[in-house]
Image (spheres, rainbow, N blue to C red):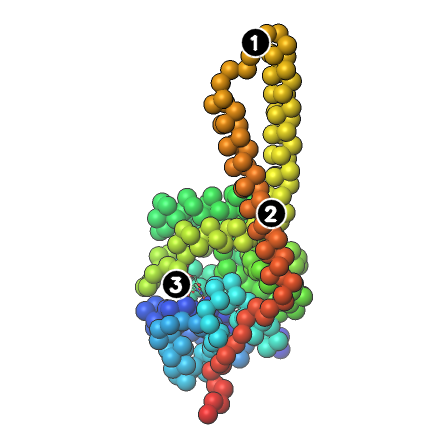
Amino acid sequence: MEVRPVLWVVIPCYNEQEVLPVTAPMFLETLNGMIARGKISDDSRILFVNDGSRDETWNLIKKLSQEDRHYSGISQSRNRGHQNAVLAGLMEAKDSCDITISIDCDGQDDINAMEKMVDEYLDGCEVVYGVRSKRETDTWFKRTTAELFYKLMSRMGVETVYNHADYRLVSSRVLQHFADFKEVNIFLRGMFPLVGFKSTSVYYERAERLAGQSHYPLKKMIGLAVDGITSLSIEPIHMIAKTGMAVSVIGFIGIIWAVVRELTGHTVAGWASTVCIILFLGGIQLLSLGIIGEYVGKTYMETKHRPRYIISERTGENKE
Ligand code: UDP
Ligand code: MG
């Protein structure tokens, strides 16, 4: 008989006490459905990663894990952000399963796409990206900023799958290699394409959050974009160099022009233009320093080799 793969579903949760009771049974039902249809092993499980929640989330996870053996959970020692929470879950899973699927816990990503992902795995793909085909349920603002985000990423030389966030299937084979990517600044959706292996996409429609609130306001989105770009690409530094080059050429032409005007008896008029140019150049210089500083800062953080996640507790662990 063919051996059925063990699937671990990795679900980051941060202050999700409102939505968890709604979505947890949905995840279990989907898992049980796949087990019943013989797609995955009965040893498969749902792994919740509590990302230092301040509410009842961890207690809920502990309770769930007592109700059904398919539920389990780990808790991070403090809030470290979505990317680190997913990473902690994937690293926890990699030696115990054949495949992982990471998915948000708020029900926005269509749970039914999981089975399609598993089918693609059974057909030989090692990475399956969940891609949003429509974003009609998102507000106009969220949709536009999100689209801008993906366009900016590709402009800046970061290879990502358009409209793919962090809903994806990854085989443990890929995770073993992924574990060799030791960087502290992580941007998962840009890193998996670097690992390679056969991949494909599965399309689904994004729904509205079932309860609770988004933790990704515009400020965090911009932060994620800056992190994603600076940890995967040095294109911004190239752009600074090119801008610097262009500005110097223009400046040089300006000087020649001023000298010619002087020699032909026309004095260069006004100081306003001079001040404008100084301000403009000053601005560009500050921006450039800021961008370079961002990279220096990243390098600094990387040299510390701090742990990327710290697991403080696991469900099923005997704690006195
Ligand atoms: N999340 C997390 N740590 C954080 C913020 C969010 O683990 O610091 C989780 C959250 O519980 C959810 C997922 O990441 O499962 C996506 O967050 P959210 O739904 O708030 O973002 P959005 O879907 O609005 O982009
Ligand atoms: Mg969400």
User: Mark 2 to mark 3: distance in Å?
Assistant: 39 Å
Give the residue type that dot 3 points to: Gly
- Residue beneath label 3, please? 107
User: Mark 1 to mark 3: distance in Å?
Assistant: 71 Å
Most extreme residue toward the bottom is 320
Q: Is residue 137 left or right of residue 264?
A: left
Give the residue type that dot 2 points to: Ile
- Residue beneath label 2, please? 292
The residue under the point 42% across, 60% down is 110
Up the image or down, 195 lies above or below 222; here it is: below
Other residues around mark 1 within 10 Å, as few (<14) / some (14–19) / many (≥20): few
Q: Is residue 44 left or right of residue 211?
A: right
Q: Position of residue 194 (x, y in %)?
A: 65, 56
> Is residue 131 in view from this perspective?
no
Q: Position of residue 103 (x, y in %)?
A: 47, 64
Q: Earlier in the sequence, mark 1 or mark 3?
A: 3
- Residue beneath label 1, please? 266
Question: Which quarter of the rendering shows the N terminus?
Answer: bottom right
The residue under the point 55% across, 33% down is 281
> Is residue 243 in view from this perspective?
yes
